[in-house]
Image (cartoon, rainbow, N blue to C red):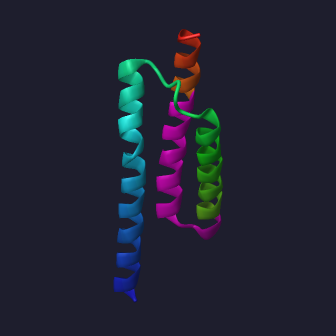
Amino acid sequence: MEDFVFWTDLIGITAGILVLSSFIPQLHKAYKTKRMIDVSIYFMALIACGMFLWVIYGIIRKDPVIIGTNAAGFILNIILMILKLKYDRLHQ
């Protein structure tokens, strides 16, 4: 049973790392170009809400993998939303 828990956690951690790493190119591009005109704020808001709900779910389930990866994703998404609002104002 311990092997099953180990592999399950490893899959969850790997999935979390892959999902979180998908934010890095967008954050880098936004910071470098100071433009996010083509990125939808509604998309980011929906993703942020979903991740926040996953954090709550993880807390209820007492699952640190779900809590950690989704809390980090939520924070990265909030940073992207802040950059979008800031850079869209610069280019109006």
**Height in image: 10 above or below 73?**
below
**Height in image: 60 above or below 78?**
below
* Magenta portion: prevailing SS class: helix
Residue drawn at the location 36% of the way across and 30% of the way down: 28
Residue drawn at the location 42% of the way across and 57% of the way down: 16
Q: Which residues are magenta?
A: 60-81
**Residue in front for this viewpoint, 24 or 37:** 37
| Residue furthest to the front | 38
Residue drawn at the location 65% of the way across and 57% of the way down: 56
Magenta residue check for 20? no
Magenta residue check for 73? yes
**Image quarter hosting the N terminus:** bottom left
**Residue in front for this viewpoint, 81 or 62:** 81
| Residue furthest to the bottom | 1
**Residue in front for this viewpoint, 12 or 65:** 12
Residue 81 screen position, x and y as percent: 56, 31
Residue 62 screen position, x and y as percent: 57, 67
Residue 69 screen position, x and y as percent: 47, 54
Residue 36 screen position, x and y as percent: 49, 25
